[in-house]
Image: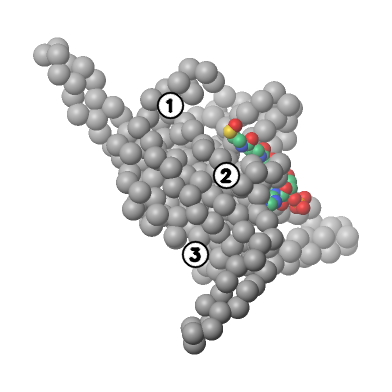
Amino acid sequence: MVKSMRQSLEIPHFGFSDEVSMLQLKDLRHSINGYLKRQHKEDKTDLPQKLSYMPFLVKAFSLALTKYPLLNAQYVPGKPGNDGRTTAGHLVYRPDHNIGIAMDTPGGLVVPNIPRVQHKSVLDIAQDLQRLQKLAQNGQLPPDAFQNTTITMSNIGNIGGRNLSPVIPPDTVCIVAIGRSQVLPRIRDLHDGKFEVIRDEIATVSFSADHRVVDGASVARFFVDWKNTLENPGRFIMELK
Ligand code: CAO
């Protein structure tokens, strides 16, 4: 861990932060969890008891990655040649979205990944996440759970805290941290010169990205796409195959 953190801190990185309204997602989750509760009451299902925010956050992230694959890439630094010059670094684009999930466990932080998220439904992701969480809590994650991570998400919101400066894991170019969503007042533009104060539910998200590979504008575009899905979760249905 110490070695990989040192490698990570050598990456010339920058931060980007903004907020996401979780109001629509909260309603969707409430409705799905109500359905799951009824199914379990009638003993009709082997589906999970309930879904947390995480499977939705992960799926929406993957939908945005499909449009902005640079954030899922790997930067391979150049090597010193025989002539004393260092060769140019290069990028490797990776088709699979193997999304690393930071997990707080009795044994400390671990970051297994959910592989090939681009092919999975929200429900598939929820099941993978629950399986990984169970293994992680018991210190039983197999070595392959940590292999080929292409990007990482760290949700600190189940514990508390709004902003985090996440450290980019080696062989990836981007990480996002999600803070605890809170009820906060926000102003809505009614587009006729009038405004209203609304009760919103806000989570702050904080990115760190490798500045050799991505710039702030690219992360901002990626973020806007991710945010649009989270704030208009009907897109999950539109993207169903
Ligand atoms: N805002 C508000 N509530 C949140 C939330 C957020 N951002 N994230 C989770 N919650 C809530 C969940 O909805 C759930 O509430 P309910 O029981 O009412 O449904 C509760 O917190 C517990 O969630 P969970 O932990 O069971 O599940 P999860 O899928 O949300 O998170 C995981 C899974 C693995 C991301 C999380 O357990 C974890 O370990 N987080 C810590 C990561 C960490 O340590 N990051 C720092 C890395 S740098 O050292």
Q: In the drawing, does residue 9 fall left or right of residue 106? A: left
The residue that appears at 55% across and 68% down in the rendered structure is 232
Cβ–Cβ below 8 Å for labels 3 and 1?
no
SS at badge 2: loop
For mark 2, does the 10 Å Cα neighbourhood hold few (<14), some (14 to 19), or many (20 or more) residues?
Answer: some
Residue occupied by mark 3: 228
**Secondary element type, mark 1:** helix
Q: Residue at x 48, y 57 (%)?
A: 226
What is the residue that sits farthest to the bottom in this orientation? Answer: 192
Q: Is residue 94 above or below residue 47?
A: above
Q: Residue at x 60, y 67 (%)?
A: 186
Q: CA distance from mark 1 to mark 2?
A: 19 Å
Q: Nearer the viewer, residue 66 or 170?
A: 170
Q: Is residue 99 visible?
A: no
Report x, y in % for residue 192: 49, 87
Q: Amino acid at mark 2?
A: Asn
Residue 163: image location, x then y, percent: 57, 44
Choose the circle earlier in sequence order: 1 or 2. 1
Q: CA distance from mark 3 to mark 1?
A: 31 Å
The residue tagged 2 is: 163
* Residue 230: percent from left, percent from top: 56, 61
Write down the residue under mark 1: 9
Q: Depth check: 76 or 190 in front? A: 190
The type of residue carrying mark 3 is Asn
Q: Is mark 3 within 8 Å of ligand 1?
A: no
Q: Earlier in the sequence, mark 3 or mark 2?
A: 2
Secondary-structure class at tag 3: helix
